[in-house]
Image (cartoon, coloured by chain):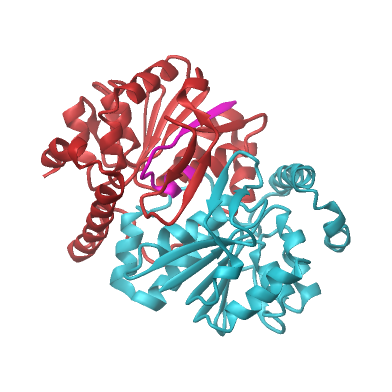
Chain colours: A cyan, B red
């Protein structure tokens, strides 16, 4: 399988690395990290960079496309016609087109989720409806060949779900064991629907802080004002 | 908090990125990725590289030290006296010294886990006893200021556990919500103690294949022959 993971400035690193660590363990699979231009891609935190070796001009097809999310970087990408056109072209060749977190906003902006159910990070999820998709608060949403995952860590669950479809149960179980994915979270607060109001507020403030840093870092404010307005 | 994550050739990317994504969300925290030399650090898969901006010469202290694991790269690091000395020096300054997966082998090699219980990835865990530690098959093992986590994805649970100690329950719950960590793994096979024999075999073969690739990629065979022998 040829797995393409699209990276862009301000990406949330775990959104990309979670699915990568699962999918790269499938038999006969190669993973390519791809960006609009080769070179350094900064995470939303500013603490970490990836070296991306492939530009979108070099990648014409994929078996699996993964679009990770970001705190705010996605807003610029939603208006990046060159990238959206590339996503549409790659999508024509895929068996599965997937997203993690706000990555679904890119798929929706590219017109790929029109009339379909989709999920995203709990905070901006309702924005999906402005781009033709039907927001659903579930961890993994499968519609035709489109699989969208909820925020950040949901990409690991999504990738295992997808691996099961591709390489089957035994191999997927082995991948889960190889990465020792036997989650034991300290609290039971990872789900928006169960979370207390005060915890939602603290989490929201953390995300807003990140987004503000992202605006400074990436200079995306002029691209995203209208979208921020829609999110209010 | 000053969080130092040590990277090295052949690192397993999720081991590093899981804790990073949690810890970087703690208030007033900066995360520094550090390597023996600045520049490109390749993951075990060969599919992804990080740009590391700090060398160990530049980092003299940490509040939290995180040593991620690797499929085979750790074996070279276990014999890298310069790195082990740096780990010992940093450890003198930390509030918490932690590891994910085979990262505990580096802590043990540095003599920091002598007489202490520790965990690691399920496959090489028994190797810990050759370096003075007491291997324990648990997801998170806390001993004094040393917290070791089991394989790969266990780093996320470890980091939330640590966050709770540092910034408390409300903020940690909010971090868990921010990264939407409400795990729903497709199978219940992430734990070595429950896994079927045939699944262990497939997983073991995957890890061995990765390790072989690592030996080619990193030229670590001369460093690791004796350690591989001990693992048999």
Quadrant of the snapshot with the C terminus of chain B: top left
In the displayed structure, would residue A192 be above or below residue A167?
above
Considering depth in this image, is B223 or B155 the residue closer to the camera? B223
In the displayed structure, would residue A29 be above or below residue A176?
below
Q: Tally the marks.
A: 0
Residue B208 left/right relative to B146: left
Q: Position of residue B126 (x, y in %)?
A: 19, 39
Q: In the rendered structure, does residue B6 fall within the stretch colored magenta?
A: yes
Quadrant in which residue A100 is drawn? bottom right
Q: In the image, what residue occupies the spot 44% across and 48% down?
A: B13
| Residue span colored magenta | B1-17
Residue B101 left/right relative to A38: left
Quadrant of the snapshot with the N terminus of chain B: top right
The answer to whether residue B118 shows anywhere in this view is no
Q: Position of residue A160 (x, y in %)?
A: 43, 66
Q: In the image, what residue occupies the spot 48% across and 19% down?
A: B94
Q: In the image, what residue occupies the spot 11% across and 40% down?
A: B229
């Amino acid at each position: 399988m040829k797995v393409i993971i699209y990276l862009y400035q301000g990406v949330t690193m775990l959104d990309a690395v979670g699915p990568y660590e699962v999918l790269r363990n499938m038999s006969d699979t190669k993973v390519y990290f791809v960006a609009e231009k080769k070179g350094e891609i900064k995470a939303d935190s500013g603490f970490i960079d990836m070296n991306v070796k492939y530009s979108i001009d070099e990648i014409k097809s994929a078996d699996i496309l993964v679009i990770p999310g970001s705190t705010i970087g996605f807003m610029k990408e939603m208006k990046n016609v060159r990238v959206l056109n590339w996503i549409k072209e790659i999508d024509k060749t895929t068996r599965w087109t997937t997203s993690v977190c706000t990555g679904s906003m890119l798929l929706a902006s590219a017109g790929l989720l029109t009339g379909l159910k989709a999920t995203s990070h709990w905070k901006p999820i309702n924005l999906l409806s402005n781009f033709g998709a039907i927001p659903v608060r579930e961890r993994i949403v499968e519609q035709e060949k489109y699989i969208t995952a909820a925020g950040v860590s949901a990409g690991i669950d999504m990738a295992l779900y997808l691996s099961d479809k591709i390489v089957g149960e035994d191999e997927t179980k082995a991948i889960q064991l190889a990465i020792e994915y036997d989650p034991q979270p300290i609290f039971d607060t990872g789900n928006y629907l169960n979370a207390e109001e005060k915890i939602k507020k603290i989490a929201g403030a953390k995300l807003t802080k990140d987004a503000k840093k992202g605006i400074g870092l990436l200079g995306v404010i002029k691209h995203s004002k209208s979208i921020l307005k829609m999110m209010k």
